[in-house]
Image (spheres, helix red, strand yellow):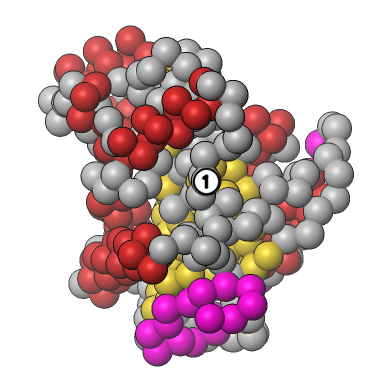
Amino acid sequence: MSVEMTRRTFRPCWCAAGAFLIVVVMAAGCAKSGTESAAPTSTTKTQLDYAIAIHGGAGTISKDISVERRTAYENALENVLRRGVEMLEAGGDALDTVEAVLRMMEDDPLFNAGKGAVFNHEGGHELDASIMDGETLACGAVAGVTTVKNPISLARLVMERTPHVLLAGPGAEVFADETGVDRVDQEYFFSQRRYDAWRKTLEKKSEAKDAVRGTVGAVALDRDGHVAAATSTGGLTNKRFGRIGDSPVIGAGTYASDAGCAISATGKGEEFIRNAVAFQVSMLVELQGLDVESAARQVLESRLEPESGGVIALTTDGSIAMTFNTQAMPRAAADSTGRFEVLIW
């Protein structure tokens, strides 16, 4: 274990950030902060056949967690990453891939999305998700759904079967009725760990140990040279009923453009919304020509407070950034060169 992170690496190939980027003028800047990056990078001029990155939320996972818990995170990320690689290797498109891997993460109670969603103040669960196609800029999102087993799939149906981008609350539930997606009772989302964290928050005790600012996300590049991004979350523990964070907000928590990059964010949603973080990173790549790692670092350092969160981002040449300013961000990346790595800190 290194000082900065624990890594499970399989045939590593340090892939750098690629080319392109922008300048977007935003009101109200936040204090500058240091960020951490996933791993060393080096410049490559090779166009990759495919690439993928995933994250399991940015937060305060202690390096003192049990071996069992750490192994659980690593195994879950590894399994999800392998599924994504299998699809991309077989010629699957980026949009199908990000949806499929996020469905896996939504079904895993280890993550704050789907089955592992946190409790809101009333003791219920409200789920948000979004997805975006970098080739066409088509996108879809849902917010505040309470009976949808896999919100990411409903978000894709919003994109494909309606003229809208975002459906929320009862309207999204009616749309779920019409499309026949898998439905569950609220009890399905219960997990003892999330319940205990909620109770501690209600009792105004210290923040639950190993809390993750809950989101899961994926970005992918397919063999046709297109990128896609997707994000799904249960939100914040003890959030107000009806609160919506950045995950279903296109340009804040999710964005994808072949001209810029695909990006999924995780962290303090309100800050990511105020600063249009996902859009800013992509625009820095597209209009200003920054590599994706530099773009992600610039936005996190210049716009966000310390301990705000992190992003994963991917350009059409296969360059990956996994940058954060929190203690940890469970994440993984792979590409057609054989790179396959899983990291937490």
Magenta residues span 1-26
Residue 75 lies, in percent from the top left, at 30, 67
Q: Residue at x 51, y 74 (%)?
A: 6
User: Quick check: can you spot residue 104?
Assistant: yes
Residue 112 lies, in percent from the top left, at 40, 41
Q: Quadrant of the C terminus?
A: bottom right
**Left or right: 20, with 69 as reference point:** right
Compared with residue 303, is residue 125 higher up or lower down, i.e. above or below?
A: above
Badge count: 1
Compared with residue 169, is residue 5 higher up or lower down, i.e. above or below?
A: below
* Location of residue 321 by image quarter: bottom right
- Magenta residues, dominant SS class: loop
Kind of residue sitting beneath label 1? Lys
* Location of residue 178 by image quarter: top left
Question: Circle 1 is placed at which residue position?
Answer: 209
**Left or right: 182, with 135 as reference point:** left
* Residue in front for this viewpoint, 295 or 111: 111
| Residue 110 colored in magenta in the image | no
User: Quick check: can you spot residue 316?
Assistant: no
Residue 304 lies, in percent from the top left, at 76, 45
